[in-house]
Amino acid sequence: RKNLLKRGVLDTDKAFHIVHSAGSETTADISTSMEPLLSKELLNYVTPALLNRVYSIDSNDGAQRGSQAVYETIGQSFSPSDLTVFQRAFDLPVEAVAHDIGGHMSNGACKANNANDCIEANLDIQYMMAVAQHVPTTYYYWSGDDFLLEWIQQVADMTDPPLVFSISYGADESELSSSYGMQFDIQAMKLGVRGVTILASSGDDGAVSPSAASNSMYCGYNPSFPATSPYVTAVGGTMGPEHRTAVYPRPDWQNDIIVPYLDSLGVGASGQGGVPGRGAPLPGFNTGGRGYPDVS
């Protein structure tokens, strides 16, 4: 889809560039030693060690249990040699991707093309394997015209799909038909019954469409799909809650969190009202929709 956008994590991208670029930032700027380079935390950077501390991860060893995969598309490629450099630099186990589906895996990916053609894929695979080590990992590249529905149908047809999928892409919910979302949800439910978890990024732009960065006419409430689907786990940053979907109603289990939050803003059921200075939403906010992200 033409409005499909990559969902990155900017601070993590910054740490990625430190390891992989030969730009103005030298290793002397960030560490006094390269043996190993970044096994500890670094001020102002997101590293595997920082993620372990912030999210209270006391072990990264998956002990070969389970399986995991990243979903990539729109020309993204990842570099196996860059993965090895990353793992050695951060003092991580040196492991290769276990399965490649769809290609777009090349040691020269970042050198032959624009670096933006590999940064998302490299970022996703490197940090997934850093947090969940010794877990068979699949790099799943999708080249079809339909960025999600045909893909998830293919996954649902797999005999033994990876048990965790990470999706760092999305589109404005308003750009998709209700039948499209419903068909996606059906496949996601089927996978859920089989024990498959789908994690979807809530996006880089909070409540507004990413398109608003270049065109103010897109400003407003634009939920991101598939994060809005109640059959995925939407993962956001650390400044939620971010949004309410315009399509999916709020489930009862969210009431204990969302209702007091809206009350604190003085917002009525219609989305109107609000106490000045408390971040009350603008008109058009859907107070009855499913809130996301689910975790941050």
Image (cartoon, rainbow, N blue to C red):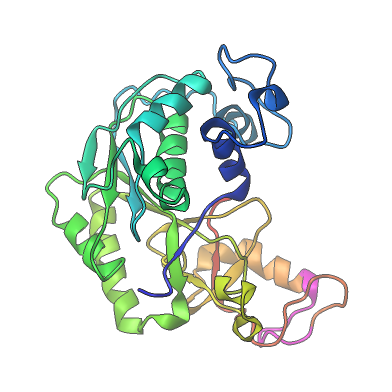
- Determine the residue positioned at 41% across, 47% down: 118
- Residue 285, percent from left and from top: 64, 81
Q: Which image quarter is the N terminus in?
A: bottom left
Q: In this view, does 92 lie above or below 154?
A: above
Front position in the image: 165 or 119: 119
**Pick the front one: 65 or 260:** 65
245 lies left or right of 158: right
Between 42 and 202, the one lying in front of the other is 42
Residue 254 position by quadrant? bottom right
Residue 239 position within the rendered picture, expressed as x and y whole percent measured from the top left:
68, 55
Q: Is residue 267 magenta?
A: yes
The image shows residue 88 at horizontal and vertical percentages of 46, 20
Q: Does residue 74 appear left or right of residue 248 in this picture?
A: left
What's the magenta region? 264-273
**Does the magenta stretch mainly form a helix, a strand or a loop?**
loop
Q: Quadrant of residue 179?
A: bottom left
